[in-house]
Amino acid sequence: MNSRVILITGGNGGLGQAAARAFLCESPENSVWLGVRARRQRAEALCGEFSERCHYVELDVTRPEAWRTAVERVVGESHRLDVLVNNAGNHHDGLLATLPPRAWQEVLATNLEAAFHGARRSCRR
């Protein structure tokens, strides 16, 4: 199997960690980048476990300029980007009638708009 360079958003959460581990175990040639915004403990631990092939990059998926910076770093250090896993997600529990509009916008920005920004930036490189 050929090596791949993979960027996974939401790299500190359970699904992001599982996806990263699957790619890392799939081939000793794969390199994984974990896109994280906050709470990096689990991402840092996985990077420590696979120190030569796993890295994390600061990425607020809701900001197009953050995507530009993150993808430039991945490509600059790994020389390419083969796979994007748009995994980051956000939710606000509560009743629709009482949900603040700002909370709704945060959910849309993270769960919908971020996938667009990430795919667009990854294809454009």
Image (tube, rainbow, N blue to C red):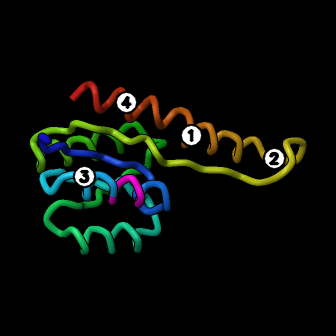
Q: Label 4 amino acid?
A: Ala
Residue beneath label 1, please? 111
Q: Check disc 4: other Cα within 10 Å, few if <14, some if 14-19, many if 20+.
A: some
Residue 67: percent from the left, percent from the top? 34, 41
What distance separates the C-alpha of mark 2 from that of mark 3? 42 Å
Q: Label 1 amino acid?
A: Asn
Q: N-terminal of the two: label 2 or label 3?
A: 3
Mark 3: secondary structure: helix
Q: Label 3 amino acid?
A: Glu
Task: Name the main secondary structure of what is drawn in magenta.
Answer: helix
Q: Check disc 3: other Cα within 10 Å, few if <14, some if 14-19, many if 20+.
A: few
Residue beneath label 2, please? 99
Residue 115: percent from the left, percent from the top? 46, 34
Residue occupying the point 12% across, 52% down = 29
Q: N-terminal of the two: label 4 or label 3?
A: 3
Range of magenta residues: 17-21
Seen as rendered, the residue at the extreme right is 97
Q: N-terminal of the two: label 1 or label 2?
A: 2
2 and 3 marks in contact (CB < 8 Å): no
Residue 113: percent from the left, percent from the top? 52, 33
Q: Quadrant location of the N terminus?
A: top left
User: Is 40 contained in the magenta span?
Assistant: no
Mark 4: secondary structure: helix
